[in-house]
Image (cartoon, rainbow, N blue to C red):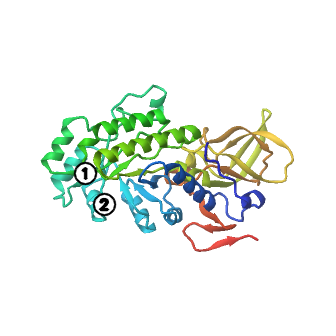
């Protein structure tokens, strides 16, 4: 990973005095990640950084991102409320399931939705008595990807987006005198500069059809890209050059939105959890925690960051969650200080797509959430903190 944050000294030197399990978000890591991504994007004219709220809806997290002038991407009214309450701006919106009421609600807040399908757009113009003729579109990029790339990126086989190559969309636009001011192109994970080159090349081929365009939204999905710092540089340089050509063609300056979720927050999060059982089975130590990988880390692959004990010995561990599901596994073959009953441990990264997509097996509640800022732990959603000297 080309963005590797430092673990907070507070968590390295002191055991947190908070309940277990809890998730701790490090303020400095969030700030430094925002700064780093913005610096990378500086080669793109008109680049703006937004956050995909589906990755984490915690109100205090959203307020921190607002503090750094990060905008929002939302896909539901629940996420919209979070963005509005935190004051995040600008706000972009796309979802395959927006209802007429949802769409009207967005327009009422001067948020232009990026329509996801022909039927969604048709329903809007037929049933809404629409007051605004300005629309956005999520665009299906109709190219083939290699078998390897197709595992994490989606071109013509994506279930999302409108095919702007076909005549149907232009008939709807022309008959209803619609003006397309936003284009949203998101392919899942943007693996490398080669895939991004195909996206931007496709966009440049059709850009003349959008003379009123104001915003190009390239989505998120850049965590994989950031595993290679050279590919990061190549990709954003490629986008910057393409945007300059588009600006010249349209004789205006287009805004370019990047909206990561995982990359912005994942590495800021630490799961503070307790060992419930610890046994040696067939020569390996088998540990069960008081939290669940199955319930919490479906999209995360946490590693042990810190063991809070005095053990001087190391062993190979298999670390399991607290459900009765056989495959509730955090880690296999993890070598570190020996963990015994009652020990506390930190796992990371768990800052994104954890609480926002948690399961509820056995009815286990979500972990408490805390913000670490200036060596103070602040319970998320509360004004009260625990200060350690």
Say which of 192 and 76 sits in front.
192
The local crowd at label 1, few if under 14, some if 14 to 19, many if 20 or more residues have their Cα within 10 Å, is: some
The image shows residue 219, relative to residue 378, as above or below, that is above
Q: Position of residue 101 (x, y in %)?
A: 26, 59
Residue of label 1: 212
Q: Is residue 75 left or right of residue 130?
A: right
Asked if labels 1 and 2 touch by Cβ distance under 8 angstroms, the answer is: no
The image shows residue 200, relative to residue 6, as above or below, that is above
Q: Position of residue 97 (x, y in %)?
A: 32, 49
* Residue sitting at the far left: 175
Residue of label 2: 106
Q: Is residue 168 left or right of residue 144?
A: left
Q: Is residue 175 left or right of residue 80?
A: left
Q: Residue at 81% of width from left, 54% of height from top?
A: 309
Work out whether residue 173 can be spotted. yes
Q: Position of residue 246 (x, y in %)?
A: 34, 44
The image shows residue 85, relative to residue 179, as above or below, that is below
| N-term mark: 2 or 1 | 2
Work out whether residue 224 can be spotted. no
- Which quadrant: the N terminus? top right
Q: Residue at 72% of width from left, 44% of height from top?
A: 287
Estimate the spatial distance between the alpha carbons at disc 2 and disc 1, rounded to whole Å: 20 Å
The image shows residue 192, relative to residue 39, as above or below, that is above
The local crowd at label 2, few if under 14, some if 14 to 19, many if 20 or more residues have their Cα within 10 Å, is: many
Q: Position of residue 148 (x, y in %)?
A: 49, 27
Say which of 298 and 340 sits in front.
298
Q: Residue at 43% of width from left, 58% of height from top?
A: 72
Q: How many marks?
A: 2
Q: Secondary structure at mark 1?
A: loop
* Residue sitting at the far bottom: 383
Q: Secondary structure at mark 2?
A: helix
């Amino acid at each position: 990973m080309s963005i590797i944050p430092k673990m907070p000294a507070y968590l390295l030197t002191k055991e947190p005095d908070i309940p277990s399990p809890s998730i701790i978000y490090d303020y400095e890591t969030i700030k430094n990640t925002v700064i780093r991504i913005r610096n990378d994007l500086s080669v793109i004219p008109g680049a703006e950084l937004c956050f995909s709220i589906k990755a984490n809806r915690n109100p205090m997290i959203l307020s921190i991102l607002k503090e750094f002038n990060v905008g929002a991407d939302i896909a539901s009214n629940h996420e919209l409320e979070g963005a509005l309450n935190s004051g995040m701006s600008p706000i972009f919106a796309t979802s395959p399931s927006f209802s007429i009421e949802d769409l009207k609600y967005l327009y009422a807040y001067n948020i232009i939705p990026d329509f996801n399908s022909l039927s969604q757009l048709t329903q809007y113009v037929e049933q809404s008595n629409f007051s605004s003729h300005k629309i956005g579109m999520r665009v299906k990029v109709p190219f083939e990807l290699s078998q390897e790339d197709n595992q994490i990126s989606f071109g013509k086989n994506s279930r999302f987006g409108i095919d702007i190559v076909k005549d149907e969309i232009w008939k709807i636009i022309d008959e209803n005198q619609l003006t397309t001011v936003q284009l949203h192109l998101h392919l899942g994970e943007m693996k490398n500069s080669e895939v991004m080159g195909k996206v931007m090349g496709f966009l440049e081929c059709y850009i003349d059809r959008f003379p009123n365009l104001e915003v190009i939204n390239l989505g998120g999905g850049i965590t994989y890209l950031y595993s290679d710092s050279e590919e990061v540089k190549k990709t954003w340089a490629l986008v910057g050059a393409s945007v300059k050509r588009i600006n010249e063609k349209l004789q205006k300056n287009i805004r370019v939105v990047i909206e990561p979720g995982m990359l912005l927050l994942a590495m800021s999060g630490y799961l503070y959890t307790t060992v419930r059982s610890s046994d040696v089975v067939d020569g390996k130590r088998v540990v069960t925690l008081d939290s669940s990988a199955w319930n919490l880390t479906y999209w995360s692959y946490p590693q042990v960051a810190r063991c809070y004990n005095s053990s001087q010995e190391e062993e190979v561990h298999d670390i399991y969650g607290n459900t009765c599901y056989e495959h509730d596994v955090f880690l296999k073959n993890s070598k570190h200080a020996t963990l015994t009953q009652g020990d506390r441990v930190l796992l990371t990264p768990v800052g994104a797509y954890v609480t926002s997509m948690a399961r509820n097996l056995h009815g286990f509640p979500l972990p408490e959430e805390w913000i670490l800022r200036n060596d103070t732990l602040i319970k998320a959603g509360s004004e009260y903190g625990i200060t350690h000297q």
